[in-house]
Image (tube, rainbow, N blue to C red):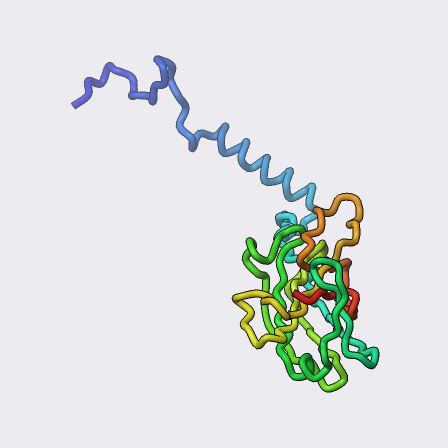
Amino acid sequence: MRPSYLPARQAVCYGLPMKPLCSPLVRALAACSVSLLVACSDGEPLPVETPPAVMDLAVAPALHALSAKVVFMDDGMGVPFFTQNGSRVHVPSADIIGKNVFYATVPGGKSVANAKPIEAGQGVVAADLSATITTGSNYPDGPFEFAVFVSVTGGELAKGPQPGDLAAFDLSKPPTGEPPVTGVSVRFRIKGADAVVNLANRNFIRF
């Protein structure tokens, strides 16, 4: 038992007596705080802050497609093409009609022989010596390469053009800021819409 001559024990913090939280002073301060909050809100419930909306920065770029139209012309002696050494030859229309047109696309400035294709496929030369190729919508804004050849010899895409085949190329100087041309493909550009490329005899050489 505690001797009656000792005062009642108080809470002590760092040697100083502490008043319990339920003291009249603490209760008065709490009541005053609640009264002020209610007065400022005119009796209405206190507003709850809504966290600001977070912008989604991971927005995928718009993708577009390429539509390529190949149209060959027969001058009466056959379909004329230049060769790699600069000479000119005529290929009979019958040797071109019905043959496969193989294509592959890669990023601008890349050689189709060394880069992984974005996509690849094939078409067929129609009886009017034309062929149409439409890619998938796989291309954001920017330059790309379109490698295309007519397999007159009946080869395969993986082997590329063989002697006697017709392969497209483009040596046009690219705009400032674009990579150099490859010399073995046709450059196309996506600018917020699908791209269209028209190819004729002059865009091909006979291997």
Q: Is residue 47 left or right of residue 203?
A: left
Q: Position of residue 186 (x, y in %)?
A: 71, 60
- Quadrant containing the N terminus is top left
At horizontal 75% and vertical 44% (from top left) the residue drawn is 177
Q: Residue furthest right?
A: 75
Is residue 195 in sight in this rendering?
A: no
- Quadrant containing the C terminus is bottom right
* Residue placed most toward the observer, 153 or 45: 153
Q: Is residue 175 left or right of residue 8?
A: right
At horizontal 75% and vertical 59% (from top left) the residue drawn is 86
Q: Is residue 85 left or right of residue 35?
A: right
Q: Position of residue 24 (x, y in %)?
A: 48, 30
Q: Position of residue 193 (x, y in %)?
A: 77, 64
Q: Is residue 59 left or right of residue 74?
A: left
* Residue placed most toward the observer, 45 or 193: 193
Q: Residue furthest bottom?
A: 127
Q: Residue furthest left?
A: 1
At horizontal 62% and vertical 48% (from top left) the residue drawn is 51
Above or below for 17 versus 176: above
